[in-house]
Amino acid sequence: MFQSPKNKLDFIEIHRSEINGYGLFSQLDMKKGDVVYVANDYISLRQPFYGTVQIGKSKHIMEDKLRYLNHSCSPNCKLVISHDSVTVISLKHIYAGQELVCDYSITESIIPIPFSCNCGSCLGRIMS
């Protein structure tokens, strides 16, 4: 049963992912341009490590849900970074139950644990 989220822009859940371990999944249908999630309660770090999101040249954050946002070279969402929050915006229609994915190469200059991408859109490039 669907429960109202504490944050009115928190319509995502963490589930097992076919891409990698766990991932973020939308609870609702979203149109292109919709705000899917806003992360404004996070820990700031100077060094990247697995699960962080880069928000500046030497600034990374760890956030409870964003750490499960998996990579795809054909993303359905993007991260919009401001001085006090990271907003997840849909790039196309996202169906309820669909995994949210973004392109790490857009926000990350260093991937702390390089990996071979298996999204099917990039021929398996190495993210490093």
Image (tube, helix red, strand yellow):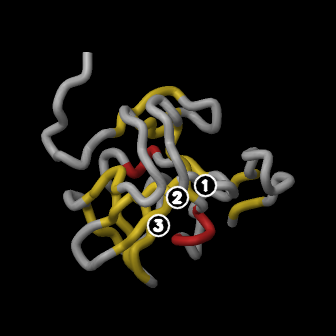
Mark whose residue sits in front, 2 or 3: 2
Instruction: Give residue 75's mark.
Output: 1
- Residue at 49% over, 36% down: 95
Is 65 placed left or right of 1 in the picture?
A: right
Q: Is residue 63 above or below residue 104?
A: above
Cβ atoms under marks 3 and 1 closer than 8 Å: no
- Residue 44 image point, x, y percent: 28, 68
Q: Is residue 121 above or below residue 97?
A: below
Can you name the residue that lies furthest to the bottom here?
57
Q: Is residue 90 above or below residue 2?
A: below
Question: What kind of residue is marked 1?
Answer: Pro
- Residue 113 image point, x, y percent: 61, 57
Question: What kind of residue is marked 2?
Answer: Leu
Mark whose residue sits in front, 2 or 1: 2
**Of the pair 104 and 43, the residue shown nearer to us:** 104
Q: Secondary structure at mark 3?
A: loop
